[in-house]
């Protein structure tokens, strides 16, 4: 359920854009959306659209599915080209250890889930 | 500075599968056992600490305790180590003289237990839950592949964590799983959350325990040998596992342990016995490195070589740990219980001559940490 601080993220996702925040005092981008900079506590922030490029930082392949999921599937953390990391799923490729190689190049894609649209990532080579 | 000690420590009569025990009963039973162990009466208790739920007020009310000091710090499974730290300062400040710290959890039977879902507007619910996480097995495990890639930790080394802890458990009649296992057994067990297999994941049990913390002066007349609290540390890193700074090391483990070692004025060579929260097999690997017992990337080989096993130079998780002894969901209380038993010379798998024990607790999924340096002398 989005809050006033996170609504711009989901609004952008619905348009097919991965937007995150950047601190105007120290210049550093960060994720997840929040009311002040986690590096310098400044509240002087701006939203910007990322390149949508990322690399696979780490993951686990769960064999016990959450409701609505079909196991096994990977729960991944990716590193955006802009630096911050976020949790996601890897789509467009069977989620096996052989297919999911750490540091592989990914690009963002979006999936609507009920009322919200969430970013997911797919291998660049598959796309 | 007032010297503060653990004067009483006890678990519930039984741990394991206790469907007829409410969560409150587990707290109360552990509390009564610990106060009796200290040679005290409940009316001697004037401070209370516990995690919700049922929380310190409910527990104190049930026990008839009228506290002058209350702590409900809740940072997951390491909360009790923080309660010990806070109790030390409360006693030094004169806010309480004798503090009772309780834990009880119906982790397996879920009797009267609250379901631990994140509030819908939390960052966890918005930015992690949509990706199909199912609690600790699918979150706590995510950093591990990064560690394996960076440091070459092998599946066999990781499996050896479970094997060695089972060796300790086989010496402990209260441990839930005691039959010896091999690396092959571990790797052949069901995959739960790649790369972790069933035998690399903790138990889910019911149980509880409590501690009585008081001044060394007050403990002088009490029956048990006091366990001195030489140093403590507490911190957190991130409530979201995806936002840990570096997936190969816990900043929280490092900070809380550095503080505890510094306050105690000890070095690693002074330590005879170690307890590290082992919700999953990789957590002791991180813990050994983040506390500084071994260098970065060395813990897997250190454990696989048997150096934390019975007869090894650094006895680790001597009760069998969360992997083989018990794990109620907030396992930290059981770390301290085993450290106290070792320092009193009454552990099932006793480390000969243990004088200094260190316990490292984890809260959440690498969210928070607490460290205690304990000794049977000042
Ligand atoms: Zn800033």
Image (cartoon, coloured by chain):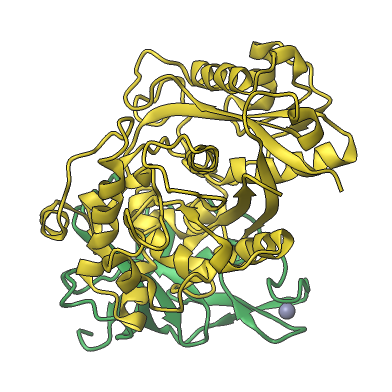
Chain colours: A green, B yellow
Horizontal relation, residue A89 to residue B244: left or right: left
Name of the residue lying farthest toward the right:
B94
The correct choice, above or below, for A103 with respect to B1 in the image is: below
Horizontal relation, residue B22 to residue B62: left or right: left
The correct choice, above or below, for B227 with respect to B234 in the image is: above
Of B21 and B43, which appears nearest the observer?
Answer: B43
**Residue at 37%, 44% in the rendered image:** B322
Indicate the position of residue B6 as horizontal and vertical percent values. 66, 36
Corner quadrant of residue B81? top right
**Residue at 60%, 46% in the rendered image:** B75
Of B304 and B113, which appears nearest the observer?
Answer: B304
Of B202 and B179, which appears nearest the observer?
Answer: B179
The correct choice, above or below, for A66 with respect to B213 in the image is: below
Horizontal relation, residue A79 to residue B90: left or right: left
Q: Residue A14: tell me if it is visible.
A: no
The correct choice, above or below, for A72 with respect to A45 in the image is: above
Number of numbered discs:
0
Indicate the position of residue B17 as horizontal and vertical percent values. 32, 24
Ligand 1 in which quarter: bottom right
Q: Residue B358: tell me if it is visible.
A: yes
Indicate the position of residue B269 as horizontal and vertical percent values. 54, 67
Indicate the position of residue B286 as horizontal and vertical percent values. 44, 66
Corner quadrant of residue A32? bottom right
Name of the residue lying farthest toward the front:
B353
**Residue at 27%, 69% in the rendered image:** B305
Of B101 and B35, which appears nearest the observer?
Answer: B35
**Residue at 50%, 75% in the rendered image:** B246
């Amino acid at each position: 359920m989005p809050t006033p601080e996170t609504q711009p993220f989901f609004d952008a996702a619905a348009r097919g854009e991965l937007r995150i925040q950047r601190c105007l005092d120290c210049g550093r981008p960060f994720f997840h959306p929040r009311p002040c900079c986690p590096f310098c506590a400044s509240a002087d922030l701006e939203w910007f659209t990322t390149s949508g490029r990322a690399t696979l930082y780490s993951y686990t392949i769960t064999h016990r599915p959450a409701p609505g999921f079909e196991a096994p599937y990977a729960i991944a953390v990716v590193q955006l080209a802009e630096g911050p990391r976020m949790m996601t799923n890897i789509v467009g490729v069977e989620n096996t250890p052989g297919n999911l190689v750490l540091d592989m190049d990914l690009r963002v894609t979006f999936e609507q889930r009920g009322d919200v649209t969430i970013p997911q990532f797919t291998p660049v080579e598959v796309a | 500075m007032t010297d503060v000690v653990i004067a009483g420590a006890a678990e519930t009569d039984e741990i394991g599968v206790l469907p007829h025990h409410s969560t409150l009963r587990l707290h109360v039973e552990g509390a009564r056992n610990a106060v009796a162990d200290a040679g005290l009466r409940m009316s001697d208790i004037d401070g209370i600490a516990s995690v919700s739920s049922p929380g310190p007020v409910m527990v104190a009310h049930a026990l008839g305790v009228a506290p002058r000091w209350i702590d409900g710090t809740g940072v997951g499974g390491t909360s009790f180590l923080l309660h010990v730290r806070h109790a030390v300062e409360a006693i030094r400040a004169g806010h309480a003289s004798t503090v009772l710290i309780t834990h009880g959890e119906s982790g397996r039977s879920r009797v009267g237990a609250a379901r631990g879902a994140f509030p819908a507007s939390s960052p966890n619910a918005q930015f992690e839950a949509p990706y199909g996480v199912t609690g600790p097995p699918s979150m706590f495990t995510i950093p591990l592949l990064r560690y394996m890639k960076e440091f070459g930790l092998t599946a066999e080394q990781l499996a050896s964590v479970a094997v060695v802890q089972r060796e300790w458990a086989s010496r402990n009649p209260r441990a839930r799983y005691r039959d010896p296992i091999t690396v092959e057994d571990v790797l052949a067990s069901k995959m739960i959350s790649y790369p972790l297999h069933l035998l690399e994941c903790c138990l889910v049990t019911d149980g509880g325990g409590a501690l009585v913390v008081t001044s060394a002066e007050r403990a002088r007349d009490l029956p048990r040998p006091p366990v001195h609290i030489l140093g403590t540390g507490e911190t957190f890193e991130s409530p979201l596992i995806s936002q840990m700074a570096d997936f190969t090391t816990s900043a929280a483990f490092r900070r809380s342990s550095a503080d505890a070692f510094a306050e105690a004025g000890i070095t690693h060579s002074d330590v005879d016995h170690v307890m590290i929260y082992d919700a999953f097999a990789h957590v002791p690997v991180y813990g050994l490195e983040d506390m500084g017992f071994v260098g970065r990337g060395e813990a897997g080989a250190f454990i696989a070589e048997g150096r934390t096993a019975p007869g090894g130079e650094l006895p680790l998780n001597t009760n069998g740990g969360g992997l083989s002894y018990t794990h109620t969901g907030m396992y930290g209380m059981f770390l301290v219980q085993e450290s106290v038993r070792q320092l009193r010379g009454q552990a099932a798998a006793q480390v000969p001559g243990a004088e200094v024990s260190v316990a490292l607790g984890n809260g959440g999924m690498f969210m928070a940490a607490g460290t205690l340096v304990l000794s049977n002398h000042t």
